[in-house]
Image (spheres, coloured by chain):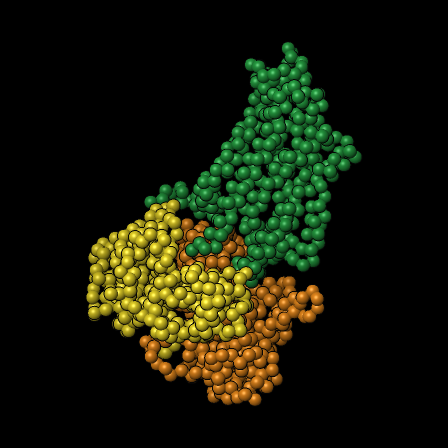
């Protein structure tokens, strides 16, 4: 099919695999005929995540990164393609099998102010997953909840347990959300922009918690974010996604130091740089004015790509190909 | 004479639990054509300062002390009528999430024209529209999109429209409160670059308010770091970034993951900012400061002048 | 600092919100008037047990004054006078207050329970179930409650007061369910619901554990409006002669005034029940409006908290 199937670490079996995933949304057509607009959120995306790694999915808004996360935890179903967790097909799971799956794959949401039910106490929020999955013994539950709260750095004092979300700060709420996820000891966690709504110093605290979870509990993470800097800090491998298409994938450090795809280069150009404000040396791959939408036929980035070749890039769609070592780039000229 | 001089400004507001000191003893000055950035975490008081300069504080807030002089005039003591004349014509503000400030049922060019006509009733509608055209060109919105409604604009375009509205009356000072927070990285970069260019072209002074120090660093000449309602460090950006003096500034800078250089483990600041209803009498950063001395708890820290423009409030 | 008791109570969000809401409510003049009136009526209802204890002649239905067997004006023995049979009007008024609260609150409560459950299920499940339930609600909503009860009374003879309450409840729930459904639809999209789904919660769990606590404030608000309509319907029924003849309600009192021809010559008998009906409905309405003000901005403030 495409060269992704010849992954570099093909000797190891991946923990999570997305195989040719597509997701389209169709808005309702008008009453007078004419089908609704088709929005392609994900376009033939394939990737593999290996046990114990933190994999970064980086993109801007509208890139489809959050959609990918939601498909993995089965908040939505893909329009095409399959997803495998630990070699088990999870697309189309129902009933008991679905519930068993939930034990293994969890999600940390972006907005700590909205992801906790304001009417439920901290203790009840964190113990709810245990109740759902039938940990009957009240003592055992309490012990697990306390232990998990402690591991995310929240004091297990009794009056804290009975507090409600509105009494906590943003950083504390996000820790509770992480505790809720970790109490089930999942194998795979999708972290959907877990720090976008938090200040820098609090974000740093959360990053360190995620790193600790990976070490102590051997959890595999999919870290979804728009921040390449955060990805560099946290992730082993990164995939850059643009309008539903993977454009570059490989070891995080390498991609950031030497990006190959024009979009990745544009992203890096745009990031604020500390202490190098007068450095003009950018890759300069972005057109000032968009060319227009060529999504369906050519390269998805053609409309904004300064270094594109008029004919080829507007007619053919590039697939992810190997480009030096373990890097994959979806560009004819990278 | 500096365009804006703020001296020992203190603002607080009444809450059911007591009086909250949102801003305490802030002093700074801004020259014509320069830009100043206020950086700090949420709740540090930076937005309050911006609102105070526009005299747009909510009803339960009061200025407890200090002076604000704009072009020599005392802004705090001015009458409401005089303030209204200054607002928008001389001092404009871009609010947080300003993209939502566009009225969804009116076309964008109408809204900007309205802003022009409100502050300059003498001009005709035709003139106003011509000005709108020029403004759109300045902020890089294609002419063909002028008659659109706000919902047809992308986030970046809406923000540009807001900037156009702020520039409509050619103010001398623009206060921008988190102008790019909700935008994507690339769009944010473009808008910041355009803003820098506009600033240089029209010699506008800008006050940037943001929690993101990296954004502010790219755009401003001077930086003021705020913590718990107080200004803790102030200086040119090269000095503040290159050789941060206050422990909070240092800690803040090391909370940001970097794109280049060593991949050090991030050192987040433990704990939380203090409650501003009964702020501690000594240094407000005391219980989170890695280099605190015992005296810091009870004695208020003093301003130490490090260079001509760079000073920090730490003993 | 804070008193330990206050802190422990403030754990519960509903206590904190109640106190906060009370602070806002207090500022609303209408709300205070409404609440004041309701307190008075409540006291009336409570005191309705007292007159018969003082003297059996004060029994609202069967009490007969040995000396008076016709309608008289206010005097020392009968503060509001007597009706055509010599029964004390004041004790009837007090008993009527009791009935009004009973009918109003029971009918409102039942319709809220039913309406909330249906609204939540319809809003959450969506699609077919939603359409089915809402069309069902529409059908019920267009039926005029009063007429239905009248028809049933005509068919089945005199109705018991509790049957009347039940019927009122069964016909008044659609309005509630629409509002609760709308609220549920917006709650459904909130991340904490998605988080519950990802944790593996069943639909029932999500509806009753997660959605219900968030719609209850709205449900209670609507309950106050329901009480109003329930009281009026019962009064109308009694007035028209279809009420429960063994229950003394204000509507029943008005019926007696009318039927015995004392409409124009016994103001002490005509006015009190009429005024009471108007005032109690007005006070519930004012209560509801003031609560609305409490709930709405509070709901908005919740989002920004933190």
Quadrant, the N terminus of chain B: bottom left
Residue lying farthest to the right in this orientation: C155
| Snapshot quadrant of residue C7 | top left
Residue at the (69%, 30%) spot, across then down: C238
Chain with orange colouring: A
Is there any visible trace of residue B141 in the rendered image? Answer: yes
Is residue B16 found left or right of C85 in the rendered image? left
Please indicate whether residue A226 sits to the left or right of residue C74 in the image. left
Q: Position of residue B226 (x, y in %)?
A: 31, 62
**A252 in relation to C290, above or below:** below
Q: Residue at x 48, y 84 (%)?
A: A306
| Residue A120 point in image, percent of width and height | 50, 52
Which chain is assigned yellow?
A: B
On screen, B264 above or below A98? below
- Of all residues, the one furthest to the top in this rendering is C67
Q: State the residue at coordinates (34%, 55%).
A: B82
Quarter of the image for residue B219 reads bottom left
Q: Position of residue B145 (x, y in %)?
A: 53, 71
Q: Is C98 situated above or below A261?
A: above
Chain C tint as drawn: green
Residue C112, x across and y down, in percent: 62, 44
Which of C117/B17 is in front? Answer: B17
């Amino acid at each position: 099919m495409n060269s992704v199937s010849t992954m570099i670490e093909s000797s190891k079996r991946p923990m999570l695999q997305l195989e040719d995933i597509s997701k389209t949304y169709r808005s309702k057509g008008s009453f007078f005929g004419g089908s609704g607009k088709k929005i392609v959120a994900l376009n033939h995306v394939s990737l593999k995540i290996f046990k114990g790694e933190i994999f970064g999915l980086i993109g801007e808004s509208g890139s489809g990164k959050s959609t990918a996360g939601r498909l993995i935890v089965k908040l939505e179903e893909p329009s095409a393609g399959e997803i495998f967790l630990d070699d088990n097909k999870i697309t189309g799971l129902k009933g008991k099998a679905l519930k068993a799956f939930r034990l293994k794959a969890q999600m940390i949401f972006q907005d700590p102010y909205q992801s906790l039910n304001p009417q439920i106490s901290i203790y009840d929020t964190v113990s709810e997953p245990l109740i759902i999955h039938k940990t009957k013994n009240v003592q055992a539950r309490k012990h697990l909840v306390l232990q998990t709260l402690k591991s995310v750095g929240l004091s297990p004092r009794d009056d804290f347990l009975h507090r409600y979300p509105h009494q906590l700060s943003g950083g504390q709420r996000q820790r509770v959300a992480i505790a809720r996820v970790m109490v089930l000891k999942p194998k795979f966690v999708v972290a959907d922009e877990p720090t976008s709504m938090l200040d820098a110093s609090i974000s740093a605290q959360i990053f360190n918690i995620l790193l600790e979870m990976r070490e102590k509990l051997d959890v595999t993470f999919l870290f979804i974010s728009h921040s390449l800097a955060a990805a560099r800090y946290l992730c082993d491998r990164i995939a850059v996604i643009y309008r539903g298409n993977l454009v570059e994938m490989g070891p995080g450090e390498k991609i950031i130091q030497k990006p190959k795809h024009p979009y990745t280069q544009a992203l890096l150009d745009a990031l604020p740089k500390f202490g190098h404000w007068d450095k003009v040396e950018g890759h300069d791959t972005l057109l000032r004015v968009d060319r227009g939408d060529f999504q369906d036929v050519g390269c998805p980035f053609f409309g904004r790509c300064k270094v594109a070749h008029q004919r080829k890039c507007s007619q053919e769609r590039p697939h992810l190909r190997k480009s030096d070592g373990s890097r994959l780039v979806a560009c004819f000229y990278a | 004479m500096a365009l804006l001089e703020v001296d020992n400004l203190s603002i607080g507001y009444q809450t059911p639990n007591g009086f909250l000191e949102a801003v305490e003893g802030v002093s700074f000055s801004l020259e014509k054509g320069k830009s100043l950035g206020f950086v700090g975490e949420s709740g540090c008081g930076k937005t309050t300062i911006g609102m105070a300069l526009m005299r747009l504080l909510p009803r339960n807030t009061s200025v407890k002390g200090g002076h604000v002089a704009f072009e020599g005039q005392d802004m705090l003591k001015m009458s409401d009528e005089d303030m209204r004349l200054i607002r928008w014509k001389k001092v404009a503000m871009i609010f947080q999430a300003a993209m939502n400030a566009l009225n969804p049922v009116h076309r964008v060019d109408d809204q900007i024209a309205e802003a022009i006509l409100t502050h300059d009733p003498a001009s005709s509608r035709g003139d106003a529209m011509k000005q709108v055209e020029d403004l759109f060109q300045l902020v890089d919105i294609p002419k063909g999109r002028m008659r659109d409604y706000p919902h047809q604009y992308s986030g970046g375009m809406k923000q540009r429209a807001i900037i156009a509205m702020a520039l409509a009356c050619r103010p001398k000072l623009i206060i921008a409160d988190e102008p790019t927070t909700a935008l994507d990285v690339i769009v944010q970069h473009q808008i910041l670059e355009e803003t820098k260019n506009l600033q240089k072209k029209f010699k506008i002074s800008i006050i940037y308010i943001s929690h993101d120090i990296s954004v502010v660093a790219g755009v401003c000449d001077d930086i003021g770091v705020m913590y718990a309602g107080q200004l803790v460090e102030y200086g040119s950006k090269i000095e503040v970034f290159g050789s941060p003096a206050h422990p909070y500034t240092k800690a803040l800078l090391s909370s940001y993951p970097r794109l280049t250089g060593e991949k050090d483990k991030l050192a987040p600041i433990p704990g939380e900012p203090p409650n501003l209803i009964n702020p501690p009498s000594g240094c407000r950063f005391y219980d989170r400061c890695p280099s605190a001395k015992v005296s810091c708890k009870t004695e208020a820290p003093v301003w130490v002048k490090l260079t001509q423009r760079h000073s920090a409030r730490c003993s | 600092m804070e008193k330990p008791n206050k802190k422990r109570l403030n754990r519960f969000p509903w206590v904190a919100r109640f106190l906060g809401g009370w602070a806002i409510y207090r500022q609303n003049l209408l709300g205070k008037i409404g609440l004041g009136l309701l307190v008075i009526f409540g006291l009336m209802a409570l005191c309705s047990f007292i007159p018969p204890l003082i003297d059996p002649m004060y029994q609202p239905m069967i009490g007969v004054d040995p000396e008076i067997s016709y309608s008289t004006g206010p005097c020392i023995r009968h503060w509001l006078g007597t009706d055509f049979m010599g029964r004390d009007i004041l004790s009837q008024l007090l008993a009527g207050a009791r009935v009004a609260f009973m009918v109003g609150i029971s009918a409102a409560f039942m319709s809220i329970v039913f309406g909330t459950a249906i609204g939540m299920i319809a809003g959450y499940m969506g699609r077919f179930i939603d359409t089915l339930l809402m069309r069902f609600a529409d059908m019920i909503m267009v039926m005029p409650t009063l007429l239905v009860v009248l028809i049933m009374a005509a068919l089945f003879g005199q109705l018991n007061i509790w049957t009347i309450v039940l019927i009122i409840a069964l016909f008044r729930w659609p309005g509630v369910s629409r509002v609760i459904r709308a609220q549920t639809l917006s709650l459904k999209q909130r991340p904490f619901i998605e988080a519950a789904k990802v944790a593996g919660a069943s639909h029932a769990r999500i509806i009753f554990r997660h959605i219900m606590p968030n719609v209850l404030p709205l449900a209670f608000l609507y309950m106050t409006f329901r009480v109003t309509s329930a009281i009026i319907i019962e009064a109308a029924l009694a007035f028209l002669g279809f009420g429960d003849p063994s229950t003394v309600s204000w509507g029943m009192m008005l019926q007696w005034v009318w039927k015995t021809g004392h409409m124009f010559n016994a103001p002490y008998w005509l006015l009190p029940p009429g005024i009471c009906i108007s005032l109690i409905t007005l006070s519930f309405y004012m209560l509801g409006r003031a609560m609305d003000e409490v709930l709405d901005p509070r709901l908005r403030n919740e989002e920004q908290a933190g």
